[in-house]
Image: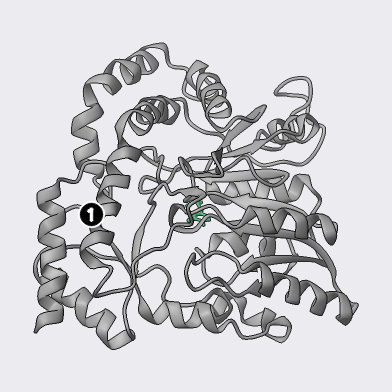
Amino acid sequence: MEFKGIKAQYLAIKDRLAPRLQKILEEGSFIQGQEVLELERALAEYIGVNHCITCGNGTDALTLVLSAYGIGPGDCIFVPDFTFFATAEAPAKLGAEIIFVDVDPETFNISPRSLEEAIIRVLKGGSLKPKAIISVDLFGLPADYSSLEPLAEKYELLLLEDGAQGFGSTLCNRPALSFGSAATTSFFPTKPLGCYGDGGAIFTRDSALAEELYSIRAHGQGKNKYDNVRLGYNSRLDTLQAAVLLTKLEALKEYELKTMEKMAQIYSKRLSSIVGTPKTPSSVASSWAQYTIKLKDAKERNGLKRYLQERDIPTMIYYEKPLQEQKAFCYLKALQEPCPTAKALGERVLSLPIHGYQTEKELDFICSSIEEYFSL
Ligand SMILES: *Cc1c(COP(=O)(O)O)cnc(C)c1O
């Protein structure tokens, strides 16, 4: 059984994809070709912002925005403790100090209350300059922007949306990746919109920022390729990947999101009386990057994972270790407060297979296997 349906998806889209790839192979415009521009226009329109700047991957997307904002040593960045490593790696690599903030036990997203406490703590400390919040739309669920936007305004902080898992979701009918002053996403193959390799993008309404990002992603180019006005990066999306994404965007809009919503509803109906199932606020439509359940403790979770594995049902643990416990972030220890919810979730969560090509029969098998485990 597939966890993310990459193979099933390929079978479904290959006839639409092949001529697009063929055209690029014949024309030979592999970097910044026509399809990249076409994709940037299509994505900006889908999200409803003026600018989409594609780049090499989701981590670069964060790095490019943070460096355009001049983030560096002395700046303090607030990041949820329960997310993928890259959310904090990007600002840390630029020399910023990271404060890990606890998350909400139901939505798994950054807790606005813990965030405000952390901001106040840093302001009282006096040695660091609070600069930005990086919120994450974890597992396809947009963060609580109706609380985060006023907080960013109150404390004059930048709000950056890490929507690597949020593409396709909405909050109050507003698409994820339209929040904050800029938003980033990843096209890693298993994300809600993924390509056949690495890819990423930045979304913003700020035209001056967009201009700077177009330059930074291509060696700080000025008037042309051989005019360099700043130090930048080499972080561009391949034309072939843009063609893959144009094709997959059609599938996402046409049926993938609808199928996943249906699957999530089946899961919740069958499982909510035996395990903790995801709670989606009524204002939210999730893109179901993950369907993540909560078990009683690590023993029950690990036992269920093994039991399902024996039945060829793949599951994943996102994220076993809170970021502040990662060895790479040891040097930041003195700045941190414990994040008990992130820690407890790491012991209890389990992500089940969910994708746009699942059948009700497959879901029935997974749910029956989980029911069996609990009847042993
Ligand atoms: C995947 C992911 C990233 C990084 O994206 P890459 O394309 O793998 O560099 C960043 N943040 C979050 C929350 C992610 O899930």
> Considering only vertical position in the picture, is 242 above or below 320?
above
Residue 202 placed where, x, y %?
61, 39
> Considering only vertical position in the picture, is 197 above or below 124?
above
Amino acid type for the residue under numbered disc 1: Ile
**Residue most toward the right?**
126
Q: Residue at x 25, y 65 (%)?
A: 315
Q: Residue at x 62, y 82 (%)?
A: 330
Q: For residue 99, say whether it is visible.
A: no
Quadrant of the snapshot with the C terminus: bottom left
> Front-most of 37 and 163?
163
> Front-most of 94 and 285?
285
Quarter of image, res 3: bottom left
* Position of residue 199 in the picture relative to residue 269 (left or right): right
> Front-most of 259 and 26?
259
Residue 221 placed where, x, y %?
74, 29
Q: Residue at x 29, y 23 (%)?
A: 17
Within 8 Å of ligand 1, the CB of disc 1?
no
Quadrant of the snapshot with the N terminus: bottom left
Residue 175 placed where, x, y %?
55, 39
- Quick one: SS at disc 1? helix
* Position of residue 95 in the picture relative to residue 129 (left or right): left
Q: Which residue is mark 1?
A: 266
Residue 306 placed where, x, y %?
18, 76
* Position of residue 73 in the picture relative to residue 99 (left or right): right
Disc 1 residue crowd, few under 14, some 14–19, many 20+, Cα 10 Å: some
> Front-most of 246 and 104?
104
Quarter of image, res 271: bottom left
Q: For residue 225, say whether it is visible.
A: yes
> Considering only vertical position in the picture, is 188 above or below 94?
above
